[in-house]
Image (cartoon, grey):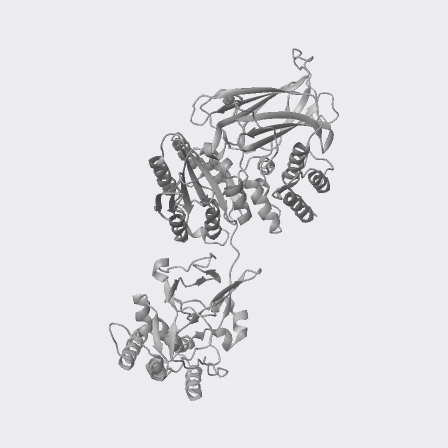
Amino acid sequence: MNDDLDDLKAIMDSVTPRPDAARRADNLALAQKNFDDLQGSRDGLRPTPVTEAKGLWTGVKTMLNTFTTKGGLTATTALVAVGFLYIVPQVMDGGPESRARDLGTDLIIPTAEPAAPVPIPPTISQIDPQLRDSNADKIGESFAHSPGQPTVNQEAPQVEMAELAAPKETEIAPTERQRVEPLREITPPQVRNRNVDFQGFGIEGEQTEGVAPDAALSATVSPAPEDRLDLNTTGSARIGLGYAPDGIVQKRPTEDLLIEPQSDTETFSTETPNALKITSTEPVSTFSIDVDTAAYSVVRSSLNRGQHPPTQAVRIEELINYFPYDYPTPDTGEAPFRPTVSTFQTPWNTDTQLVHIALQGQMPALEDRPPLNLVFLIDTSGSMNQPDKLPLLKQSFRLMLDQLRPQDEVAIVAYAGSAGQVLAPTPASDRSAIIDAIDTLRPGGGTNGQGGLQQAYAMAEAMSEDAEVGRILLATDGDFNVGINSPDALKDFIADKRDTGTYLSVLGFGRGNLDDATMQALAQNGNGTAAYIDTLSEAQKVLVDQLSGALFPIAGDVKVQVEFNPAQIAEYRLIGYETRALAREDFNNDKVDAGELGAGHAVTAIYEVTPVGSPAQLSDPLRYAPNTVASQSDEIGFVKLRYKEPGEDVSQLLETPIVGQSIPGTEANFAAAIAGFGQLLRDDRYLGDWGYDDAIALANANRGEDAFGYRTEAVQLMRLAQSLSR
């Protein structure tokens, strides 16, 4: 072996002439002929048994000598020739293991006379470790297009071979019979510019240009105990794959492959915080209710990663409404929800007041729930190939299945570059069939959200029967890039489908390319809700603990309109609800869509108001203010609410006055603490010197029973935000 290496070094040290295209073609043809003559052909394959390793090396030497005779040898050509020694037994293997793989059977190989192991050529990094550091961009130790096999980058510089030592062979003691484990399929990594796409491992990167589709690249290799993928916080990955040719387990040297951090392409709604309103000129405020919770989970995700959340991601009303509240419930025979209004001193400004509006929905008995037709619409595009996306999605839906009843039905539609049915309508009692269908999902391709929505709506309509609830549950990272992909266009598409009676809710997964704006457009216009699931605990909250509220509506198109008395209130501002604002005339227009209230859901809205004559007033009084207002009234305002019973087209009206100040209870105080927290994250211009310490103290004092620990977690997030703001 040392003589062979000396021969190879002597060849590489020779002067390399300028490449000649004609000679190159002749050389390749002659090398192929020599290889065929040495190896022979059998059943259209070129087998390379381990026992013929010495003969293979003779063929490689012959090829090298031929190249030298015909016009010289470059270092790259020499290294490629050496690579044949390792690649050919794997890629062109026509031996018994290949046949077992093709037949899908286990392979029993007698090992009374074990074959000699195939030497494994060293990688460039082992030849000269400095090359990986000084020439990393040129070397790039890429993977060949042949399944699962490494090859040397053709741009690698020439290297000295004197230090090469004979590779160590893995010895396995002979046994009576040795069983090769069943084969499994993986898709090989593709590397370009040090970005890695570990298909099947949930790590997405940049795919090599000109590479065949994933299906063509999938390879079958024998698993070995050393198979592993280790990630660290620096963004590098270490992968080691073991192969078992002819029953001999060998380990390929492990290399560090750098993964570039995923680019941040997240998008959020761009509405600016609500401005201060002058009561005498604009006394009426109108908005749609919002029971979405996605913003809170996004804020939590950012803070737990040590990052300040994007400003536009902080929708304060969603932070407030993330928590369950113990508000008074409606009596039997009343409206499906009960409004409660109170007024108390603002925690961050003693000269203003907070108007706290609370709605508490009924929770019908389980046996009174109508049958549910649920269509899981699952994004299986390539962008879902992350551990906190499709894998977490599968786990989340497993949790949910136990909450469904035998009379409920489940269907599954998946979409990537195209859309297709994964599971026909199936009774929820057939849990194993549903789980099996979920487990078949694999990421890959584009994101044809339009096609998926069209098929999901068609399936929901086919499942629909009288007195049943139809709901599409879309699980995605929001990255629609095929078909309709803009929030405005999706809004129009969903609005056309809304009249079918099928509700559309959205579950967001993953960060990095989260399209929050699209998710909001879908949920708000699909008569549904939007949540973001970043942990399995959040899946438990949304899909188990609060499933009834998420899936079963009790009131539709719920609108709130507040009129403030100019004689009592000089200024006001609504905290949050920027994406839910409605025109004043929309309140009485039953054709204008608004938010839905689910079973047992609570909704909270908070205004900060400035009484007339308060030193906190920021605007100057009008010189020509109207003098006909009812200055003698004790009311500071009046609240009106409109809603529709599920399935109805005509709204009903509820009214309640806003009077005097009261002492806030635990629920109102905690909501105020979260409102202050949201303003600290997004827009603190109205908070004065009030800061995180104050928000933490107010929230801590009003955690109440906190059975699930949500409020305790909020206090911890406040502390994290405080540390990041210093």
Query: In the image, is residue 288 above or below residue 304?
Result: above
The answer to whether residue 577 is seen in the rendering is: no
Query: In the image, is residue 716 above or below residue 318?
Result: below
Q: Which quadrant of the figure contains the N terminus?
A: bottom left
How many marks the image carries: the answer is: 0
Q: Nearer the viewer, residue 502 or 113?
A: 113
Q: Position of residue 556 (x, y in %)?
A: 48, 28
Q: Is residue 294 left or right of residue 390?
A: right
The answer to whether residue 163 is seen in the rendering is: yes
| Residue at x 46%, y 48% (from the top left corner) | 398
Looking at this rendering, what residue extends furthest in the top direction?
Answer: 628
Q: Nearer the viewer, residue 593 or 625?
A: 593
Looking at this rendering, what residue extends furthest in the bottom direction?
Answer: 3
Q: Position of residue 536 (x, y in %)?
A: 53, 49
Looking at this rendering, what residue extends furthest in the front direction?
Answer: 367
Q: Is residue 567 left or right of residue 134?
A: right
| Residue at x 36%, y 84% (from the top left corner) | 54
Q: Position of residue 625 (x, y in %)?
A: 67, 15
Q: Position of residue 346 (x, y in %)?
A: 70, 30
Looking at this rendering, what residue extends furthest in the left direction?
Answer: 43
Query: In the image, is residue 31 above or below residue 509?
Result: below
